[in-house]
């Protein structure tokens, strides 16, 4: 039983992958620890055939080798069941907003499964940890839970550890005043998913952070020659830039968000 105050399920998940490139790399293991509003946990773990060789350096980290997953289903084979399991859930993880959620979105988009994060709260326990105690998941687990993380870099162990860490963070920091990177006082950690979402959210428009929101809430580019410029203005002044990005090596999620902005701009004319 858990002590999280939930209005809907909160799915803690962790991915083991072939590498850290959101565009090119693939999932080899996914584990979801779903915390239900009634206090129960529902855990599901899948090994996945990534349909590409796993680099030795990656295998040495998570312990999964080509031979281990050669007979496992591909992501396409389990994508619909995973999406169904996550239906109606908010999402939580450790460094999930920067890596796990973007890579999972790419996998879903790649196989044509509709999985939308709009309306979901995204809680990143690493963000809270770095605000309060900048370290790694293993250190966080030891610091907050007083235990050594056994089987680190296995998806289920990491997802369960993240679940325990967030619970401990809520108890430890309840009501403690904190400041963001700019020194502004922000809402303290509370047992409320909306507050935790706001606390750990980023300014990114797309998960790769190629576009972000400026202080006025406008989408601006966050890289290259148009860094800091409004996306709307760039697409209007240099229409070919949209085509260049769509043909370039950018995540599918980035291209989709860019297309949404372009279509919105067209309707505003």
Image (cartoon, grey):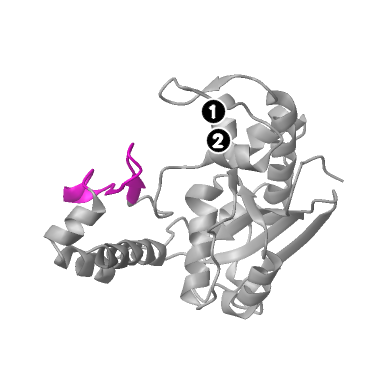
Foreground label between 2 and 1:
2
Looking at the rendered structure, the secondary structure element under dot 1 is helix
Q: Position of residue 172 (x, y in %)?
A: 72, 25
In the shown orientation, is residue 106 left or right of residue 268? right
Q: Which residue is depicted at the point 43% across and 54% down? A: 207
How far across and how far down the image is residue 266, in percent?
25, 67
Image quarter (top left, top right, bottom left or bottom right) of the C terminus: bottom left
| Residue 3: assigned label | none
Outermost residue on the left side: it is 237
Tell whether 100 sits left or right of 80: left
In the rendered image, the vertical position of residue 24 relative to residue 132, given as above or below: below
- Determine the residue positioned at 46% across, 55% down: 20
Using a 10 Å C-alpha cutoff, classify the residue at mark 2 as few (fewer than 14 neighbours), some (14 to 19) or many (20 or more).
Answer: many
Residue bearing mark 1: 131
Vertical side of 177 occupied by 15: above or below:
below
Residue at the spot x=51%, y=42% of the render?
201
Tally of numbered tags? 2
Quarter of image, res 21 = bottom left
- The stretch of residues the image draws in magenta is 211-229
Tell me if residue 210 can be seen: yes
- Marks 2/1: CA–CA distance: 10 Å
- How far across and down, in percent of the image, does residue 209 sit? 37, 50
- Please tell me in which quadrant of the rendered image residue 175 appears: top right
Q: In this figure, which residue is indicated by the disc labeled 2?
A: 199
Q: Residue at x 81, y 39 (%)?
A: 3
Q: In the rendered image, is residue 68 in sight? A: no
The answer to whether the residues at label 2 and label 1 have Cβ atoms under 8 Å apart is: yes
Secondary structure found at label 2: helix
Q: Earlier in the sequence, mark 2 or mark 1?
A: 1
- The magenta stretch spans residue 22: no
Left or right, 165 with respect to 28, comes to: right
């Amino acid at each position: 039983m858990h002590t999280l105050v939930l209005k809907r399920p909160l799915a803690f998940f962790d991915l083991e992958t072939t590498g850290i490139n959101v565009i090119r790399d693939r999932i080899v293991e996914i584990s979801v620890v779903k915390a239900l509003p009634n206090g129960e946990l529902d855990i599901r773990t899948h090994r996945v055939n990534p349909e590409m060789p796993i680099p030795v350096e990656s295998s040495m980290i998570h312990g999964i080798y080509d031979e281990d997953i050669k007979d496992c289903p591909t992501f396409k084979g389990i994508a619909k069941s995973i999406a169904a399991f996550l239906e109606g859930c908010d999402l939580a993880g450790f460094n999930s907003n920067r890596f796990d959620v973007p890579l999972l979105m790419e996998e879903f988009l790649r196989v044509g499964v509709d999985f939308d994060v709009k309306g979901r709260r995204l809680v990143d326990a690493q963000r809270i940890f770095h605000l309060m105690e900048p370290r790694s998941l293993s250190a966080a687990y030891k610091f907050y839970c007083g235990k050594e993380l056994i089987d680190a870099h296995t998806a289920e162990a990491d997802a369960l550890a993240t679940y325990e860490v967030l619970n401990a963070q809520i108890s430890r920091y309840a009501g403690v005043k904190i400041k963001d990177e700019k020194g502004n006082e922000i809402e303290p950690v509370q047992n409320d998913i909306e507050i935790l979402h706001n606390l750990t959210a980023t300014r990114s428009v797309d998960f790769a952070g190629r576009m972000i929101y400026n202080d006025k809430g406008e989408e601006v580019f966050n890289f290259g020659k148009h860094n800091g410029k409004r996306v709307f203005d760039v697409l209007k002044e240099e229409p070919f830039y949209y085509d260049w990005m769509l043909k370039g090596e950018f995540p599918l999620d980035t291209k989709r968000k860019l297309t949404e902005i372009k279509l919105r701009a067209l309707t505003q004319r």
